[in-house]
Image (cartoon, rainbow, N blue to C red):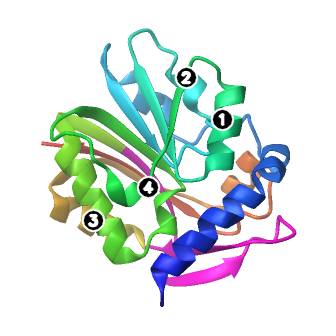
């Protein structure tokens, strides 16, 4: 499977459908247990949102002293995020090129974004996250549950296909532990609850939510 080509096509799908994504996205949804994760951050923490999309959760980090940075590889999506969230920092960035200094980031969040990578690239990014986190730095990760890698059309939009990879909870926990992380919490949110929270039938599978810490 030519993942590099599929990554390019996935990016195009997000760029082409950025405005439709804005219309069809549920803005009231806060993935559990994200609030608890944010509350655990110290004043002055530097937080990087991998695959920030429209910056839907950026306003949750308005806690005094939290330095939020949203990254996404879709130019069109970042453009909308900047308009919707003035005075918030967003950058166009490839997940596979995290060039932050070692021990320089206090926390990462990655909400249904890293599943667009194949498994070897996902592992590479997890290792980069670990490297760039400070000691006791934290990761909040949301991934879709399942197995296999696919390149498929997103039925919500008129055109564009996306590359997706699914994981089991056991598999994700193993990858994180192998990278050096300690697992603080791991839960599975059932498909029915995801659909209720997002007000969408598109989210047709359960998701895995993991909070981990570098030690």
Q: Residue at x 47, y 14 (%)?
A: 63
Dot 3 or dot 1: first in sequence order is: 1
Q: Is residue 63 above or below residue 102?
A: above
Q: Is residue 135 above or below residue 18?
A: above
Of residues 55 and 35, the one nearer the viewer is 55
Which disc is residue 88 wearing? 2
Q: Residue at x 67, y 65 (%)?
A: 12
Of residues 128 and 37, the one nearer the viewer is 128
Q: Alpha-carbon distance for marks 2 and 4?
A: 19 Å
In the rendering, at what x and y percent does residue 27 appear?
A: 74, 36
In this picture, which residue range is highlighted in magenta?
140-167
Q: Is residue 44 above or below residue 75?
A: above
Q: Name the residue beneath numbered marker 4.
A: 94
Dot 3 or dot 2: first in sequence order is: 2
How busy is the neighbourhood of tag 3: few (under 14 within 10 Å), some, or many (20 plus)? Answer: some
Q: Name the residue beneath numbered marker 3.
A: 124
Dot 2 or dot 4: first in sequence order is: 2
């Amino acid at each position: 499977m030519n993942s590099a080509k599929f990554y390019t096509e996935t990016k195009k799908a997000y760029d082409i459908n950025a405005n439709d994504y804005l219309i069809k996205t549920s803005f009231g949804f806060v993935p559990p247990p994200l609030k608890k994760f944010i509350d655990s951050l110290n004043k002055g923490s530097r937080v990087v949102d991998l695959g920030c999309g429209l910056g839907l959760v950026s306003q949750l980090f308005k806690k005094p002293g939290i330095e939020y940075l949203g990254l996404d590889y879709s130019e069109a999506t970042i453009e909308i995020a900047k308009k919707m969230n003035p005075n918030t920092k967003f950058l166009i960035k490839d997940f596979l090129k995290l060039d932050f200094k070692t021990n320089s980031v206090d926390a990462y969040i990655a909400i249904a974004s890293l599943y667009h990578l194949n498994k070897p690239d996902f592992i590479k990014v997890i290792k980069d996250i670990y490297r760039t986190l400070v000691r006791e730095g934290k990761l909040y990760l949301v991934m879709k549950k399942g197995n296999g890698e696919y390149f498929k059309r997103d039925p919500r939009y008129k055109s564009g296909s996306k590359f997706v990879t699914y994981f089991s909870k056991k598999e994700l926990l193993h990858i994180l532990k192998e990278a050096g992380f300690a697992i603080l919490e791991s839960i599975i949110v059932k498909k029915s609850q995801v659909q209720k929270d997002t007000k969408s039938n598109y989210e047709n599978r359960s998701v895995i939510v993991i909070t981990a810490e570098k030690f």
